[in-house]
């Protein structure tokens, strides 16, 4: 097989696998299965989930006080299996790109990301769902997916001219990334249901909030953060910031959609933006249904990749101009 075609296929496979890993990670986190296995990389010291009576007795002897729950352990281990496969594919991408003499910036970035992600995955378990680590792990997953998408776009023909102000597209990308980060902080601190109503919070538009505790990134709460340990006012502060961030994303990305209104891509971007709002509101009104919450996570990833696509296209549009200037000199 042609080496270039092989590289492209491996990158596509890695992108598909990264999408699955992001969704599996969201499911694991939202189903409270993040500590389904109390150790890493195994599960109760085994390669698979203990299921037989003998395995369960051995597992509970190794970890007294932590009963085996296969319904939570399996999602965690499946997530690890898929993440391991993704890591292997990213290393294959690096090897193929190096053998072809291609630019190695993106492949090396991918390799570093998956190694760091593996470390954060381990720390998520060993540090008992410490919010800072859980949020960083979520952002690392989105970063890996984004870099793979960027690589896919770089291997394809140029997207074409897009008439969008570059600074506005960059602002939209920053806004989406920050909103995803706040969303990670919401879920890692179990603040999704801090406000049981919408658009108010506990019947107020400006509820009592504790921003100092809610956004204390040096917190060392432990030893087990399952279920969260912040008080109500701190969680409300986190939830309200996420809602305000959603409004900012709606405005910034909405104006991006307006610039792209003559293209099918613009309508698709607008649809994803609206669906994200519907899913976010549904999480509150319907008491965080697991399927809706996972779809909200996947929708955030989709929105990120679409806004990234606009930025990549604008970068491709500028490359010929830069080359022409260099030739004229």
Image (spheres, rainbow, N blue to C red):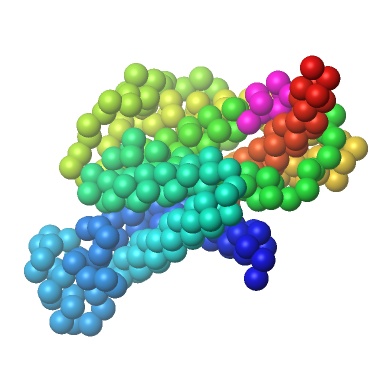
Q: Is residue 78 left or right of residue 183?
A: left
Quarter holding residue 172:
top right
Q: Residue at x 87, y 41 (%)?
A: 263
**Secondary structure mostly seen in the magenta stretch:** helix
Q: Residue at x 25, y 65 (%)?
A: 43
Q: Is residue 70 left or right of residue 114?
A: left
Q: Position of residue 23 (x, y in %)?
A: 51, 56
Q: Position of residue 58 (x, y in %)?
A: 12, 74
Q: Position of residue 197 (x, y in %)?
A: 53, 37
Can see residue 297? no
Seen from the viewer's position, the closer of residues 310 and 211 is: 310
Q: Is residue 142 left or right of residue 152?
A: left
Stretch of the chain drawn in magenta: 164-173
Seen from the viewer's position, the closer of residues 41 and 150 is: 150
Can see residue 53? yes
Residue 300: within the magenta?
no
């Amino acid at each position: 097989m042609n080496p270039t075609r092989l590289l492209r296929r491996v990158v596509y496979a890695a992108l598909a696998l990264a999408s699955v890993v992001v969704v599996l990670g969201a499911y694991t986190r939202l189903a409270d299965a993040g500590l389904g296995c109390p150790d890493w990389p195994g599960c109760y010291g085994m390669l698979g989930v203990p299921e037989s009576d003998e395995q369960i007795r051995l597992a509970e002897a190794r970890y007294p006080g932590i009963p085996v729950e296969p319904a939570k352990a399996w999602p965690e281990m499946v997530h690890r299996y898929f993440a391991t496969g993704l890591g292997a594919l990213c290393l294959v991408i690096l090897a193929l790109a190096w053998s072809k003499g291609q630019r190695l910036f993106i492949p090396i970035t991918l390799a570093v990301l998956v190694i760091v992600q593996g470390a954060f995955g381990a720390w998520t378990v060993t540090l008992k769902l410490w919010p800072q680590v859980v949020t960083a792990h979520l952002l690392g997953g989105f970063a890996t997916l984004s870099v793979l998408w960027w690589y896919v776009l770089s291997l394809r023909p140029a997207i074409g001219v897009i008439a969008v102000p570059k600074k506005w597209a960059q602002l939209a990308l920053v806004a989406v990334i920050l909103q995803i980060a706040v969303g990670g902080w919401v879920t890692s601190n179990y603040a999704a249901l801090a406000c049981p109503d919408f658009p108010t919070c506990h019947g107020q538009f400006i509820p009592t909030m504790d921003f100092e505790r809610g956004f204390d990134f040096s917190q060392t709460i432990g030893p087990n953060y399952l279920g969260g340990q912040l008080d109500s006012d701190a969680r409300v502060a986190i939830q309200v910031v996420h809602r305000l961030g959603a409004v900012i994303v709606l405005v910034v990305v909405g104006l991006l959609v307006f610039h792209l209104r003559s293209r099918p891509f613009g309508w698709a971007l607008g649809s994803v933006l609206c669906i994200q709002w519907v899913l976010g509101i549904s999480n509150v009104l319907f008491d965080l249904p697991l399927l809706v919450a996972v779809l909200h996570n996947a929708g955030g990833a989709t929105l990120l990749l679409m806004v990234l696509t606009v930025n990549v296209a604008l970068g491709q549009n500028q490359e010929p101009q830069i080359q022409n200037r260099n030739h004229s000199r």
